[in-house]
Each structure stands twice: as structure tokens, then as C-alpha cells.
Amino acid sequence: MTRTSHTVSFTLNGEKKTFDTRPDEKLLTLLRREGYRGTKYGCGQGTCGACTVLVDGKATYACLLYSMQAEGRKVRTIESAGTFDKPGEFQKELIAAGAVQCGYCIPGMVMSATALMESEKDFSDEIVKEYMDGNLCRCTGYEKIWVALRRVLDRREAATAKRPVAGKKTSSKGAKK
Amino acid sequence: MKLSEFIRPASLAEARKALRELGPKGMPLAGGTALHFMQSKTPVTAVDLTGLGLSFIRRKGGFFSIGAATPLSDIQRYRSPRWAMHEICRRISTHQIRNVSTIGGNICRVFPWADLPVVLLAMNARMVIYSGKESEMGADEFFSSQPARLFSGGNLLTAVKIPVLKAQHGFGSVKANRNAAAFSLVTIAALLELDGTTIKSARVAAGSAIPFPKRLPEVEAALVGREAVTDVFKKAAAAGGTAAKWNVREGMSADYMRQLAEVSLLDALERAAEFARGRVD
Ligand SMILES: Cc1cc2nc3c(=O)[nH]c(=O)nc-3n(C[C@H](O)[C@H](O)[C@H](O)COP(=O)(O)OP(=O)(O)OC[C@H]3O[C@@H](n4cnc5c(N)ncnc54)[C@H](O)[C@@H]3O)c2cc1C
Ligand code: FES
Ligand code: FES
């Protein structure tokens, strides 16, 4: 049996790291304490999605994960998705669409969209809603966030020529059901 | 819940030994999502179950066997002929929660809003419990009261066995909630066995709007031996409306909840009958 010391080691944005922690510290608290402040604290109870990170490629609420649960896993935060000078593809579209109001929800939205784009080939509205249903925007800017995301997804679909963009039925309505 | 230690046992036997030694100071941890909301006077040691090979879905004989630490998102995505578990898992909370929370965590300590106990009661699932060796317990006994009673001595749930539905079986589940990610107001699940157009057997269960998930024998009695038609389903649903004491919920009267339960019962029965007649999605 491994009785753990109070440290946790995991790959963070591609780099192997070891952190001091406490058994009941949340991954969200650890990340923010260590300077990864792009991951936001919203509700702290698994409702808003502001704290979304990827753990082994899966979107996860960092506020409901004990830091110890990240041992040996691959964790990715918004800091891996792009920078102010070099935003990622979805981030560029968010800016172009004027989708960012206060911006608090955006890191979580970007991480959920990253999980979607890396895991799926089918970007039907139903699948997109499934991946995005755990991210709330308190500024209620869903419409433009959805438009920005659809632009990226439509481009990807066109590139793989799985579903041609022309004539494809997608909804420009908000991402929430 | 405050954690004082976090241990990662290498085997089920080690996990059980640690939990037996720790007594009330130990707590199995699967996804850990519920632990954040549980209260305890003193900090506990979390015993992590996720490294024990308990995440799987296999079809074996007449059962689908789901490992206790299988995340809900894996159950939602699994497909096989006569498989019906995906429907309810898609309706539980959000993508991020489903990626982490597990079937075992959902049923070993039942919270009032839990959806899976309702479905497993209707499906007549069997729970596999490790107590040094594995044994099975049927859903009726497992959910006869809070299942946490079964795990206080360090025993662990290892798998849930779901009977593969036969051709004449149909299953339907309905979750009524205010928005896609919200807790359930009423959850209903129904398993019907048809003999031609007649209902040969029925298992119907409800949860959320009642204090603890349970079967509704009054509804089942109103179905068995009768035709699988809307009129019969309506009468059975009405029997369900009066059979249970439906809880008052935020802003909703008990009578409203009763009506919601009746409508949900009718929907679940119609869905189960469609499934038995060959609906595949
Ligand atoms: C925001 C939010 C919304 C939710 N909405 C819903 C909903 O709509 N419907 C619904 O059904 N659920 C809902 N849930 C509940 C969610 O599915 C639970 O948190 C989950 O079921 C617990 O799973 P877990 O794997 O995280 O369990 P854990 O938190 O790890 O454990 C829960 C309990 O089960 C025990 N346990 C776990 N595994 C075992 C085992 N193998 N053997 C013995 N004991 C074990 C633990 O000791 C603990 O007491 C929601 C949760 C959150 C946070
Ligand atoms: S802060 Fe984690 S879901 Fe809101
Ligand atoms: S932009 Fe403000 S919360 Fe979404």
C-alpha cells in the first residue's frame, strides 16, 4: 500500500511537476496557488464550469477534484490553449465574434471545447451541447460563444470533408438547452 | 468532508484491510464528487478505489457487468443491442461531472436525487459486493434502505450486473427536471415484459420526489395481465399518483409533484412498450 506523503506529481501542460499539497486541497486551489490563475473559481460546487481543466483529455471540474486525485495524470489548463499574443483558434473566433464580455467563463468554455475537438469527429449540435452543457456564462453571452465555436467546428468538418459545410443544418441559437 | 490522509491501495484486499482498520475514520473514494458535500465531525482518510481495475463494461452471459468505478460518461457512451443504461446517464448532471463520478459512488450512498438507484431497481440489477470474497445482492435488498449500511465494515462494491433485456422486454426511463443539468424532480423507470400484446411482468420504480427510491407495487399490479395500451398505462400511472406521498419541492405543491409523477410514469411506460416493440435508440 502506498501511504502518500503530502505531495502530488502530475504532468501539467506538458511538464512533469511535483507540488506540496494537503489531502483535502482541491486541484483548483493548488493550480491557482501555483500561479495558474486562468482557471477560475466560480461556484466551487460543480455547477458553473469556470474551473474546467482537462485531466487525461477529459473535461473535469477542478473544484470537485482533490489535488491527490491528479497523481500520475496529465492535467491541462487554459494556459496551454493560447496566450494573449498567440491565441488559439477558438480564442481568436471568440474575440472576432465579440463573445467575451466579463470573460470569467471563457477559460472553462475553451477547455470544454478543446475536449470536444480532441475527442469527437462528429460536431452535430447534440454532441456540441453535450460537451458544453457544464459551462455557464453569467453574462449570458451564449449566442456569440456558440457562433464562434461553430465557426471553428465547421472549418474542421470542412477540412476533414466528413460533412460539407454547405447546406448543413446547424443552429446558431444558444448552447444551452 | 475534511481529508486527513489519502491512500492508494494496490488491491481490493488492501483497500478492505485499510478500511477495516480505519473504521469510521476511513472512506472509500471513487470519483470523489460526493465527498466534497458530505459532513463529518472529524477528518477521514480517503481510500482511492480508482487504481483497482474496477472501471469496465463487459457483456458476460445474460448480464452486462459494469465495474463499480466506471465513470457515468463511459456508461453513457457504451452501446450494445438491448442496452438501455445510456439514456439515464446522459441525463445526469453535466459532462464534467459524468466524466468523474462513478456508478458505485452514485449507488453506495444514495442521496435523495440519485437517478441510478431508480433505474437499477426497475432493471432488477445485481450488485457484486467484496467482503474478502465476492457475493451478489439483488436490487430490492440492496436498496431496501441506505446501502451505505453494507459498506461500513470495509466491504466494497465491485460491480453492477444488469440483465440483458430479452426480445420481449422493454425499458423506459424519464427524468423530469427544470433544466438539463439540474437535479431530478421526479425520476421514473419501467421494465415491461410482454407476451404478445399482454404485459406478463412489470417492474416500476420512482425516485427524487419521494424520500428514498422505491418500486411502486400498485403500478405494477395495475399493469400485469393487461394489454400494453395507453389506457392501461394511464390507469397504472394514476395508481402511482395515489400510492406514494410525493414531496413538496421548491415552489411546487405536493399535488403538482403527484401530477408530474403521473405524467412521467405514463411517459416511461409508453417508452418501455415502444422498446419492447423494437425501438432501438
Ligand atoms: C453538481 C452535481 C450535480 C449532480 N447531479 C446529479 C443528478 O442529477 N443525478 C444523480 O443521480 N446524481 C447527481 N450527482 C451525483 C453524482 O453523480 C455523485 O456525486 C456521484 O454519484 C458520486 O460518485 P463518485 O464516484 O464521485 O462517488 P464518491 O464521491 O467517490 O463516493 C460517494 C460515496 O460512495 C462511497 N463509495 C464509492 N464507491 C464505492 C464502492 N465501490 N464501494 C463502497 N462504497 C463506495 C463513498 O465512500 C462515498 O460515501 C450530482 C453531483 C454533483 C456534484
Ligand atoms: S467553480 Fe468549479 S464548477 Fe463552478
Ligand atoms: S463572459 Fe461573463 S461570464 Fe461569460
Image (cartoon, coloured by chain):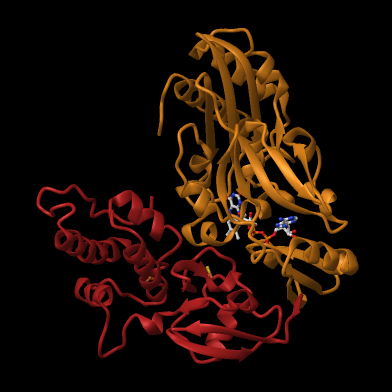
Q: Name which quarter of the figure residue A8 lies in.
A: bottom right
Residue B139 visible in this rendered orientation of the protein:
yes
Taking the spot 59% from the left edge, 67% from the top edge, the residue there is: A45
> Left or right: B108 with respect to A65?
right
Chain A on-screen colour:
red
Q: Position of residue A44 (x, y in %)?
A: 58, 71
- In the image, the chain rendered in orange is B
Residue B24 falls left or right of residue A127: right
Viewer can see residue B179: no
The x and y percentages for residue A58 are 46, 66
The answer to which image quadrant residue B54 occupies is bottom right
Q: Nearer the viewer, residue B252 or B201?
A: B201
Q: Quadrant of the C terminus of chain B?
A: top left
Where residue B201 sits: x, y (%)?
A: 63, 16
In the rendered picture of this protein, how many numbered marks are placed on residues?
Answer: 0
At a point 59% along the width and 42% down the height, the residue shown is B185
In the image, residue A27 sits, relative to residue B13, either above or below, namely: below
Say above or below: B32 vs A41.
above
The answer to whether A86 appears left or right of B278 in the picture is: left
